């Protein structure tokens, strides 16, 4: 027989232990990371983690294990255990003081000690996740933190989601190491942990360790440590052959070897052999405990076994001494899950049913034996395992409610699905739980939506609608239609608006109700094609919300109403609406509405050109998101609304810091694509074309996977064209422009269409004719759109009378373009460019001001105002240098050299080369590049006949007979070599 149950010497894991210690050393310096430790059952994962924790020094080690319950794990079990340990160590108030935002209502979903949870909904789970990560980050400010999650192969989906969140959102600079263990041999092809491991394996700061079996030499060392003597060669040959180097099996074989006994024939017999040496009374208690799971509370086992504390302790003491059970807080755990599994599998069918019934009856008598929500969920498990359909249905219904309290939507969905599965087997099911089948379908559809099971949610809502008569039960039908419509919207499925309209028509209009207010508010959000209907629907929803006392719905409806009514040309008249919505939301602690208000207000301010105010509103919203505990969700969306005005204002470095910080938080893909798009704009303007293309490709991969609104699609189309131009791929750029014009309805989105038209107009050629046609049908509302409109007019030569006046009230921005009528061509173009420059200067957008100044300088030179051209170039260069816009600086310098324009304090040039005028020099440049007269006309916005006249003059001045000879002269004297 062996002297020690386990080896005092830690054998064969020096490399793996060093890897964990290196990860912890990195965490100490702020290099947060995650290590995934896999290996077969019994290979030593728990021992490795324990040895590592013992050597972790000053680091705080927090350990939580996933608990198996039937085929699923308990929701959030490891994180509940970690929190409970923190409360024991720091006290409730000590933990509360570390929670971001100062409120523990999110954590109350895991521990009742933290009070009542906050409201339900998708934001409830987001807040719980962020508060837990924020708590870990706060702990790490004092000392390094190691979070160990054991047995992830048993993790339920809620636990997997939270674990994924913690790993993906680890920030650099935080002294946090996450270690996750799992049984590799449990991961069959469809195991739910497999895709999570694959996903996390692609994260830069995640490493994987696979624990191998021990070599024969290492098994000898292990055996010698256990026996305190060197084992014989023949014994080791047999033990190594039977164990195959699995440390747990080595220990079990050594415990059974000696005294002339034959070794057990099977692994099951081997694991049970240690149990069978215990007293009969202890063995019986272990069989009882095996039905309770890997870990069982002392009080629950006492209640099920019918033993008082003293009798139970005396009966279990041999199991603890024999290293079959270990004391675990206020309960017991099997030393290894394989032992429990072997015991449970050894139960006869009748024993299995009787034991689970005894567990269920004990919990029915006193559910408080187990913490919330574990008690309700384990009760449902035991009644289901006992094959009592009636009580299985009832307990599943109550377990679903408990899971909802914890925001464990996947567990809630599983419990509600069980209710539906058992419904036909329980004749009085409706009476038993107090709701009928349709209500269960509706609740299950809602939870499926929250759990991300969109297709299932739609199927459940449709099934519910099939069971009721809309005319007899309009309100119930409306709830199901609203749920199906909201889910359909998230799926980008056609018909979601029809569902909401139908729901609105079913709810009685003569009697104000919370349901009608909610349906109308949902409908108002979805109406993008009919603004008048959106306004009237939001107005009615707001009034109804106020009348029935639903502040959350009232606030959301007011936000939708204000956003829909808002006119960029008179923005100040609408800002009070957002302020009022925030006030209403605050009365009901409706944080979701408050954050949505910040998103909408900052958006319309940016659209109106109020960049500073937009940035401030977004910044305040981010701070609110951090206080509420949703910085990584709503906060990252607001980061888009902060970065955009910063880009407009030319505060590019500041914008990049906002973008980089938001991207570090791993926001949802659509948010990430928007952030990457803004970073791409800056990179391209600074001449970092490779980086711009990299960011563009990343955002394109997201946009290619779904249907997105114009606010994402049209800026993306702009970037595509600009990148192609930057690479000199002009024909591809024109093809992309034509494709966009064919596929997109630009007239529907003036805010995003005008910047696109300006970008496409710079391509020149025949495309300009179509662009002019679009522009004539496009409104220009507000100062930003007017600035783009004036720029487009300057680029294309389209007059005010040809384009039509701007819509909305006139703020005076860009005034002057209309007075260009009656001037000669050059003076008229100069006037138009100067109007565009003034518009961008008024908006404080330095990059747009700089490149329109370039156009104005060209127009001034053409008009014969060389000094004026120099002044404009000097200002443009100053702005471009401040921004770091290297390509624009180079272009300005090349133009100044080519046009012999003095910039700032440079001496005045002697005149243009070869006696050519500025326009002739411009035409010669295009001739040298091989462009036809028609191409040149399109680029310079002049007629083909005028180009022909210029070419004739050029040939005469150069003394050559053909365009080819003229090109040769230009190349020979390197006339355009600096371009």
Image (cartoon, rainbow, N blue to C red):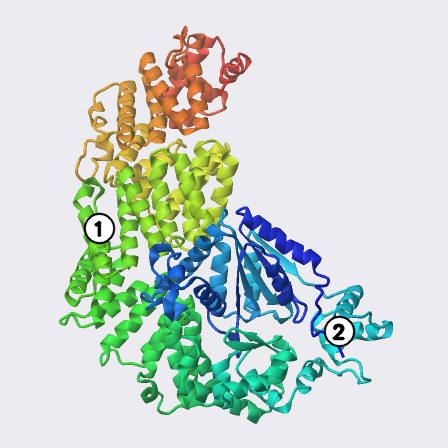
- From the viewer's side, name the closer residue of 10 and 213: 10
Cα distance in 3D space between marks 2 and 1:
70 Å
Q: Residue at x 26, y 52 (%)?
A: 597
Which image quadrant is residue 573 in?
top left
Residue that protrudes farthest toward the left in the picture: 510
Residue that protrudes farthest toward the top in the picture: 910
| SS at badge 1 | helix
x, y percentage for residue 452?
A: 42, 65
Please identify the quadrant where the N terminus is shown: bottom right
| SS at badge 2 | helix
Label 1 belongs to which residue? 578
Q: Taking 444 as reference, is 909 above or below it?
A: above
x, y percentage for residue 234?
A: 86, 74
- Left/right placement of residue 66 relative to residue 236 reads left
Q: Taking 444 as reference, is 170 above or below it?
A: above
Q: Which mark is residue 243?
A: 2
């Amino acid at each position: 027989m062996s002297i020690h149950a386990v080896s005092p010497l830690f054998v064969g894991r020096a490399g793996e232990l060093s890897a964990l210690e290196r990860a912890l050393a990195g965490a100490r310096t702020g290099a947060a990371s995650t290590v995934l430790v896999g290996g077969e059952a019994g290979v030593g994962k728990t021992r490795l983690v324990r040895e590592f924790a013992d050597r972790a020094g000053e680091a705080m080690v927090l350990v939580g294990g996933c608990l198996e319950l039937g085929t699923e794990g308990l929701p959030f079990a490891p994180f509940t255990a970690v929190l409970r340990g923190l409360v024991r160590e720091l006290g409730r108030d000590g933990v509360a003081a570390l929670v971001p935002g100062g409120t523990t209502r999110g954590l109350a979903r895991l521990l009742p000690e933290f009070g009542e949870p906050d409201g339900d909904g998708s934001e409830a789970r987001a807040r719980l996740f962020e508060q837990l990560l924020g708590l870990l980050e706060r702990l790490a400010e004092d000392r390094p933190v190691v979070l160990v999650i054991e047995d992830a192969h048993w993790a339920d989906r809620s636990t997997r989601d939270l674990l994924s969140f913690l790993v993906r959102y680890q920030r650099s600079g935080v002294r946090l190491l996450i270690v996750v263990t799992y049984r590799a041999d449990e991961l069959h092809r469809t195991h739910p942990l497999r895709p999570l491991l694959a996903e996390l394996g692609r994260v830069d700061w995640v490493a994987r360790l696979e624990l191998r079996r021990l070599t024969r030499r290492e098994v000898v060392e292990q055996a010698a440590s256990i026996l305190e003597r060197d084992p014989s060669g023949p014994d080791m040959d047999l033990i190594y052959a039977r164990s195959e180097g699995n440390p747990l099996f080595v220990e079990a074989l050594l415990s059974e070897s000696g005294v002339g006994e034959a070794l057990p024939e099977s692994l099951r017999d081997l694991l049970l052999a240690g149990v069978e040496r215990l007293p009969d009374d202890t063995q019986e208690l272990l069989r009882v405990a095996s039905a309770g799971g890997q870990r069982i509370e002392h009080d629950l086992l006492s209640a099920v076994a019918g033993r008082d504390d003293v009798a139970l302790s005396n009966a279990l003491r041999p199991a603890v001494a024999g290293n079959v059970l270990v004391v675990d807080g206020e309960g017991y755990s099997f030393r290894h899950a394989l032992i429990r599994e072997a015991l449970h599998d050894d139960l006869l069918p009748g024993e299995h049913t009787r034991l689970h019934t005894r567990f269920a009856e004990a919990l029915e008598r006193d559910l408080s034996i187990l913490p919330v929500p574990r008690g309700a969920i384990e009760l449902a498990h035991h009644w289901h395992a006992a094959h009592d359909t009636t009580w299985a249905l009832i307990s599943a219904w109550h377990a679903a409610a408990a899971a909802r309290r914890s925001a464990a939507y996947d567990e809630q969905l599983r419990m509600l699905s069980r209710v539906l599965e058992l419904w036909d087997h329980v004749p009085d099911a409706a009476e038993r739980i107090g709701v009928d089948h349709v209500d269960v379908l509706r609740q299950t559809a809602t939870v499926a939506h929250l759990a991300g099971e969109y297709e299932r949610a739609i199927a459940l809502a449709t099934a519910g609608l099939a069971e009721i008569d809309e005319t007899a039960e309009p309100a119930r039908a409306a709830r199901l239609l609203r749920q199906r419509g909201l889910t359909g919207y998230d799926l980008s499925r056609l018909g979601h608006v029809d569902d909401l309209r139908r729901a609105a028509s079913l709810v009685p209009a003569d009697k104000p109700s919370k349901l009608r207010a909610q349906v109308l508010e949902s409908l108002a959000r979805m109406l993008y094609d009919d603004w008048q209907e959106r306004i009237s629907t939001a107005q009615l929803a707001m009034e109804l919300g106020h009348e029935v006392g639903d502040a959350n719905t009232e606030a959301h409806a007011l936000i939708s109403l204000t956003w829909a009514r808002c006119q960029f040309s008179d923005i100040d008249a609408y800002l009070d609406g957002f302020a009022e919505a925030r006030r209403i939301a605050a009365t009901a602690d409706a944080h979701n509405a408050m954050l949505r208000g910040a998103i909408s207000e900052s958006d319309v301010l940016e659209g109106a050109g109020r960049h500073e105010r937009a940035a401030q509103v977004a910044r305040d919203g981010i701070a609110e998101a951090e206080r509420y505990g949703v910085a990584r969700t709503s906060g990252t969306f607001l980061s888009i609304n902060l970065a955009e005005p910063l880009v407009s204002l030319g505060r590019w470095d500041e914008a990049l810091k906002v973008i980089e910080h938001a991207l570090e938080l791993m926001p949802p893909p659509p948010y990430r694509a928007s952030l990457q798009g803004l970073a791409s704009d800056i990179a391209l303007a600074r001449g970092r074309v490779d980086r711009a293309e990299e960011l563009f490709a990343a955002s394109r991969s997201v946009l290619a996977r779904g249907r997105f609104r114009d606010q994402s699609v049209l800026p993306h189309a702009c970037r595509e064209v600009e990148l192609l131009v930057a690479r000199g791929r002009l024909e591809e750029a024109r093809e992309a422009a034509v494709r966009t014009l064919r596929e997109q309805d630009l007239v529907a989105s003036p805010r995003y269409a005008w910047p696109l038209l300006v970008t496409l107009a710079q391509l020149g050629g025949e495309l300009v004719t179509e662009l002019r046609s679009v522009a004539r049908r496009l409104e220009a509302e507000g100062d930003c759109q007017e600035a783009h409109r004036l720029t487009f007019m300057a680029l294309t030569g389209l007059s005010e009378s040809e384009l039509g006046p701007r819509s909305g009230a006139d703020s005076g921005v860009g005034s002057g373009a209309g007075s260009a009528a009656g001037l000669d061509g050059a003076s008229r173009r100069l006037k138009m460019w100067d109007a565009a420059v003034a518009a961008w200067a008024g908006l404080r957008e330095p990059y747009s001001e700089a490149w329109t100044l370039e156009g104005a300088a060209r127009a001034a030179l053409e008009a014969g105002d060389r000094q004026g051209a120099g002044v404009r170039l000097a200002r443009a260069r100053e702005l471009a240098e401040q921004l770091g816009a290297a390509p624009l600086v180079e272009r300005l310098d090349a133009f100044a050299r080519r046009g012999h324009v003095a910039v700032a304090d440079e001496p005045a040039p002697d005149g243009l080369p070869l006696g050519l005028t500025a326009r002739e020099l411009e035409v010669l440049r295009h001739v040298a590049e091989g462009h036809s007269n028609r191409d040149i006309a399109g680029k310079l916005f002049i007629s083909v006949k005028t180009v022909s006249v210029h070419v004739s003059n050029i040939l005469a001045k150069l003394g050559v007979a053909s365009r080819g000879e003229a090109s040769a002269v230009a190349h020979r004297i390197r006339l355009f070599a600096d371009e």
